[in-house]
Image (cartoon, rainbow, N blue to C red):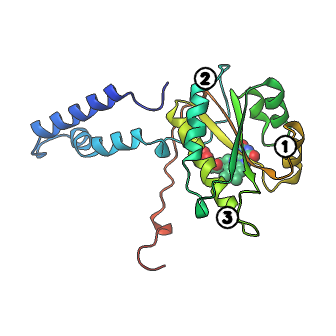
C-alpha cells in the first residue's frame, strides 16, 4: 500500500473534515467517535502527508526494482540537505546490481537485508570539499542521509540506514568494491525498496525530553 495519500485523497479528506465541522459545529450530543473525527482529522491528515511521521526502518522488501526517476529524486532530496558553510561535501553512490547488494549485505552482521533490497545508496564524503581539520562533514552527510530516508518514504518505499562510518571494516569493503579514490569516504549506507511491511512510525514523543526556555 502506498504510504502517502494521493493529492485527490488528501483533498477528499479535507472536504470531508470541513463538511463534518460545518454540520457539527456544536459538538454537544455527539458521540465520542464523532468528536474525535471532527477534532483530530485535520491534524491526522497533516501527519499522513508528512514522511517524517511515517518513516521507520524497513528491513524486508518485495522483489521489485526501483525506478530510475525515483532514485534520481531521492538523490535530489539528499542534495537539498543543509551543510556547514555551504560546502555540500557529499557524493551519492547508487547501486542496484546483485553484486553490490550482496557486498553490502555481507559488510556487517546487521546489513543482511540489503541482499533483498531494490537498491543501495552510499552517502560518501568528499574530504577535498570538507572543511579541513573540522568534523562538520559528519553532520552534513547525516543530514543528507536523513533527507534521503524521508524521500524514500515520499516515493512510496521504505529503507534502513546501515551504520558505515566510522566502522573501518565496512568502509574498507565499500571503498574496495567501488574503487573509491582516497579522498572519498563512505559515510552511510541505505538499503531501500518496496517494503513488505507498512511504513507507520512509532509515536516516540516524550515531552520530558523537550525543554522550553530552560533545561
Ligand atoms: C547511524 C545509524 C546506524 C544504523 N545502523 C543500522 C544497521 O547497521 N542495521 C540496521 O538494521 N539498522 C541500523 N540503523 C537503524 C536503527 O536501528 C533504527 O533507526 C532505530 O532502531 C530506530 O528505529 P526506526 O528507524 O524504525 O525509527 C542505524 C541507524 C543509524 C542512525
Q: Nearer the viewer, residue 82 or 52?
A: 82
Real-space Cα distance between discs 1 and 2? 25 Å
Q: Is residue 81 left or right of residue 121?
A: left
Residue positioned 44% across, 32% down in the render: 4
Report if the beta carbon of the residue with label 2 is closer than 8 angstroms to ligand 1.
no
Where's residue 44, x and y in %?
35, 42
Q: Earlier in the sequence, mark 1 or mark 2?
A: 2
Residue 56 in sight from this viewpoint: no
Residue positioned 47% across, 45% down in the render: 53
Residue beneath label 3, please? 136
Residue positioned 59% across, 32% down in the render: 72
Q: Earlier in the sequence, mark 3 or mark 1?
A: 3
Real-space Cα distance between discs 2 and 3? 33 Å
Residue 53: give its label.
none
Do labels 2 and 3 touch, CB within 8 Å? no
Residue beneath label 2, please? 67
Q: Nearer the viewer, residue 56 or 122?
A: 122
Residue beneath label 1, please? 180
Q: Is residue 166 above or below residue 112?
A: below
Residue 107 in sight from this viewpoint: yes
State which quadrant residue 121 falls in.
top right
Where's residue 98, x and y in %?
80, 24
Label 2 secondary element: loop
Q: Is residue 165 left or right of residue 73?
A: right
Where's residue 74, x and y in %?
58, 36
**Residue lying farthest to the top in this orientation:** 64
Q: Earlier in the sequence, mark 2 or mark 3?
A: 2
Amino acid at each position: 500500500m502506498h504510504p502517502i495519500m494521493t493529492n485527490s485523497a488528501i483533498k477528499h479528506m479535507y472536504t470531508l473534515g470541513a463538511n463534518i465541522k460545518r454540520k457539527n459545529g456544536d459538538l454537544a450530543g455527539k458521540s465520542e467517535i464523532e468528536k474525535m473525527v471532527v477534532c483530530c482529522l485535520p491534524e491526522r491528515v497533516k501527519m499522513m502527508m508528512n514522511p517524517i511521521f511515517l518513516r521507520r526502518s524497513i528491513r524486508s522488501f518485495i522483489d521489485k526494482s526501483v525506478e530510475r526517476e525515483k532514485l534520481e529524486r531521492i538523490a535530489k532530496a539528499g542534495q537539498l540537505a543543509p551543510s556547514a558553510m555551504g560546502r555540500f561535501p557529499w557524493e551519492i553512490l547508487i547501486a542496484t546490481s546483485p553484486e553490490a547488494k550482496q557486498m553490502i549485505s555481507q559488510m556487517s552482521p546487521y546489513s543482511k537485508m540489503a541482499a533483498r533490497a531494490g537498491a543501495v545508496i552510499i552517502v560518501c564524503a568528499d574530504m577535498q570539499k570538507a572543511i579541513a581539520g573540522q568534523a562538520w562533514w559528519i553532520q552534513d552527510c547525516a543530514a543528507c542521509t536523513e533527507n534521503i530516508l524521508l524521500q524514500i518514504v515520499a516515493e512510496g518505499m521504505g529503507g534502513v540506514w546501515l551504520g558505515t562510518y566510522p566502522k573501518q571494516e565496512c568502509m574498507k569493503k565499500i571503498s574496495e568494491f567501488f574503487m573509491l579514490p582516497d579522498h572519498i569516504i563512505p559515510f552511510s549506507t541505505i538499503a531501500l525498496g518496496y517494503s513488505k511491511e507498512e511504513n507507520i512510525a512509532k509515536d516516540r514523543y516524550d515531552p520530558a525530553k523537550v525543554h522550553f526556555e530552560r533545561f
